[in-house]
Amino acid sequence: MTKKILIVEDHPSMITAYQTILSHNRLGHDLEFYSANNCESAYECISNEINTISFDLVMLDYSLPPFPDKNIFNGGDLAVLVHKYIPLAKTLIITSHFESVILYNIYQKTKVNGILVKTDFDDEELLLAYDKIMAGENYFSKTAKKAKTDRLLAEGHFDTIDRQIITLISNGCQIKTIATTIKVSEDTVKKRKSKIKDILGIDKGNDEDILRECRILRMI
């Protein structure tokens, strides 16, 4: 199975490195690579005014030479265009930024499938991110994931019921017992658990995954 990948990066050596790493992907995909080294050339690759290629994945460095004529100043702006022009394409932003506010703002603005912070990941994690994203999951490296979760917690996205559910999960309670204890329906508990997983950045997982992330955040 051949996948078309666009890499937008202003350092040619990094493009070559990403291509080499991804060529060893564990999904067995044959990869057809395309590249751009600034916002203008990337726009030409992405825009339906010019583009005739339906990319499967677009990898975007966040800091890029801008294209002011089209109000495109970084990889985040390009990610928004990818979603507009190539809605089936997956998007991955790679950035040197590690500040929580910046990373969360990137996520909020772009709704990309993944964010990797350059100080976080190595070859193996890039391959893991590729595997997850191409399988339909989201993937955030350690710093990006923490920034997203910290911000959501700071904004009060976990209310009293969410915290009660987490506490009861930590006590080994199952859905039926949780519903009875806090006097809500089992469907409500299921929906709340899905919300909790989303805030914690858990795409697919069970109660143990929820507890692991909550322990890291010192919530339990």
Image (cartoon, rainbow, N blue to C red):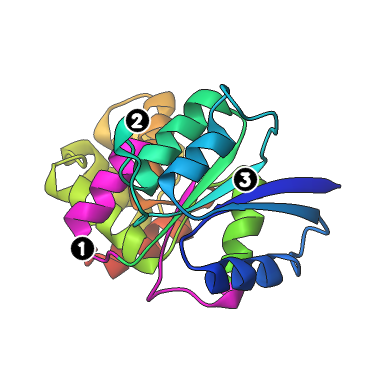
Is residue 196 something that shows in the picture? no
Mark 2 or mark 1: which comes first in sequence? 2
Alpha carbon separation for disc pair 2 and 3: 22 Å
Image quarter hosting the C terminus: bottom left
- The image shows residue 11 at horizontal and vertical percentages of 48, 68
Left or right: where does residue 99 sit relative to residue 122? Answer: left
Identity of the residue drawn at 44% across and 51% down: 38
Please give the residue where the numbered disc 1 appears in the rendered image. 99
Please, what is the three-letter code of the amino acid marked with disc 1? Glu
SS class of the residue under badge 3? strand
Mark 3: few, some, or many residues within 10 Å (few <14, many ≥20)? many
Q: Nearer the viewer, mark 2 or mark 3?
A: 2
Magenta-colored span: 97-124
Identity of the residue drawn at 27% across and 54% down: 103
Mark 1: few, some, or many residues within 10 Å (few <14, many ≥20)? few
Please, what is the three-letter code of the amino acid marked with disc 2? Lys
Alpha carbon separation for disc pair 2 and 1: 27 Å
